[in-house]
Image (cartoon, rainbow, N blue to C red):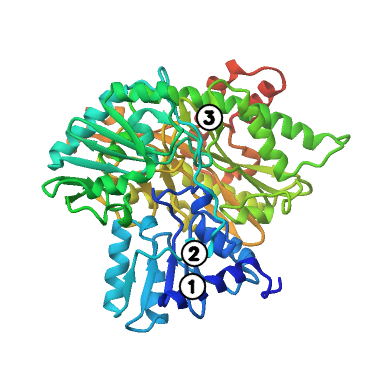
Amino acid sequence: MDTRTSPARLRIERIQELLREQGAAAVVIPSSDPHLSEYLPERWQSRQWASGFTGSMATLVVTAERAALFADSRYWVQAEQQLAGSGIELVRIATPAAPQHIDWLCAHVARGGTVAVDGNVIGLAAARQLGDALARCGIALRSDLDVVALAWPERPAPPASAVYEHVAPEAPHPRAAKLAQVRAAMTTAGASHHLISTVDDIAWLLNLRGADVGYNPVFLAHLLLERDAATLFIGAGKIDRALERSLAGDGVAVAAYDAVAARLAALPADAALLVDPKRTTLGLVAGSSARRIEAINPSTLAKSKKSEAEAAHVRRAMVEDGIAMCEFYAWFEAELADPKRKQAITELTIDAGLTEARARRPGYVGPSFATIAAFNANGAMPHYRATPESHAVISGDGLLLIDSGAQYRGGTTDITRMWPIGRISEAQRRDVTLVLRGTMALSRARFPRGTLSPMLDAIARVPLWEHGLDYGHGTGHGVGYFLNVHEGPQTISRVIAEPSMAMEPGMITSVEPGVYRAGRWGVRVENLVLNVPAASLRDQTEFGEFLEFETLTLCPIDTRCIDPSLLRGDEIAWLNSYHATVAERLAPGLSGAALAWLRERTRPI
């Protein structure tokens, strides 16, 4: 691409002009919004707009002379392609949270210079880390300058989708009970007020859902809790009068979305405001003189622990999801084998077909993320997404990776499976088998209740490490209950463990090790698991309560992709037992070709 006409190049040049006009040496553009969300409404996709890089996570830094994008290994191939011609340097970082951009700023900004960041999209903890590190380099941080807003006058308006109630039976716990639970935690913390800005926390706490953010049934809002009142700050027209009356019945008033900062600034000086520094922006509370109590949102911990009633709904959602996948994959394999087929099957076909199959299931709301259907080399990009302009045709020989999921009123799903197309090589079969061994190793683990989730990460990697293999992403993320497909606080990954990451009963987490060979193929095998008491150890140990995983996901693992000679006897037994469960749970909802396909794909080895 001609760098003189690259949209990203022109946008970077405009940002650099504004930096000079404003007397700033650099600007940090994170991938975030006023709610520090992972998935962003278009209005706050500033990093994507400025750089042209469409991955979900990265940090862009622009100085008067240069620009750099900081991304972890999930995005390196994609970033190289999308940054071509932009003049933006790709800086490869080890993990998503690596603060390498701060070191880069210290190296490229002179002492006495100023770095700008929009305080409305950077968390308290992140701003503190950035400001302290820059100060040690003699650099000032300015958080009241939104350079992107000046450079992007045509930025989209905030989303305006309506909000609706999540009702029984899928919402088994009333709003009043959840509010009482969080207020009890406020009292324990010594807080008179509590600000919540994370959209999934608010949706969970108030039993509300929306459509402001792609794939996640949430809406943009802030919530201010007091001991006996609450105010929901939300866009005009998003809540109708009937819903407003319903909220009022539980003591929740509705106010304008942009009135929250002024309300916080008006809190009395003797107020004690509970905020989560990792989930609240600097700009939101900067004007408040209230005493600040910093701790994780009580709702974040509460919603991560699904109740027995919620777990029962999730199990039902998994059956519906499994039925849909069986129907799709039976059709998919039949189409591939049909010599009279008139139209090519592509990665886009898979996306559309899976969505159509799921849409027929009761309780379905929509996809839980953009489907990743990645054939051969495309599978080596963990967050690859096919587009009408760039996608592969499913033909010839190779490995097909399909990572997909759905939102149901009774749960959220996320699953990755591997499929052989034509003939696959022994090397491909070996990679799939070793990744599957990692999935099984963690799925079978038992551990003391309260174990910090990052400590479990190595269990899935050991079968790969034994052969000199590894992967750059985390092994598992928390999953919401008809909420965000990525949910904290638990994470099974190589991060610094925190007390809030303790594993507790009721948490749902993904298990998804992988192997990625750039330019050739990628492998990932993913199930969702539920933390449950380890029943067999309940009365057999003096070392406290132990937990184990119940595998929730119900879909065959294609044994044509594996080399059984690389599996131990106990691993083969686990796989056969899993397939027996899949067949037992899904067969009653299937018939014809889909039922025959299920029986064939769940035959024991």
Residue drawn 58% across the image and 48% down it: 432
Element assignment for label 1: helix
Of residue 171 and residue 198, the one placed in the foreground of this image is: 198
Residue drawn 72% across the image and 51% down it: 391
The disc at residue 150 is 2
- Relative placement, left or right, of 591 versus 156 is right
The disc at residue 560 is none
- Asked if one can make out residue 531 in the rendered structure from this viewpoint, the answer is no
Q: In which quarter of the view is residue 547 placed?
A: top left
In the rendering, at what x and y percent does residue 470 appear?
49, 58
In the rendering, at what x and y percent does residue 388 appear?
73, 49
Whether 118 is drawn above or below 23: the answer is: above
Of residue 475 and residue 23, the one placed in the foreground of this image is: 23
The quarter in which the C terminus is drawn is: top right
Tag 2 near tag 1, CB within 8 Å: yes
Find the distance from the CA under tag 2 to the CA under tag 3: 49 Å
Whether 418 is drawn above or below 217: the answer is: below
Q: In which quarter of the view is residue 244 placed?
A: top left
Tag 2 near tag 3, CB within 8 Å: no
The disc at residue 554 is 3
- Relative placement, left or right, of 222 versus 8 is left
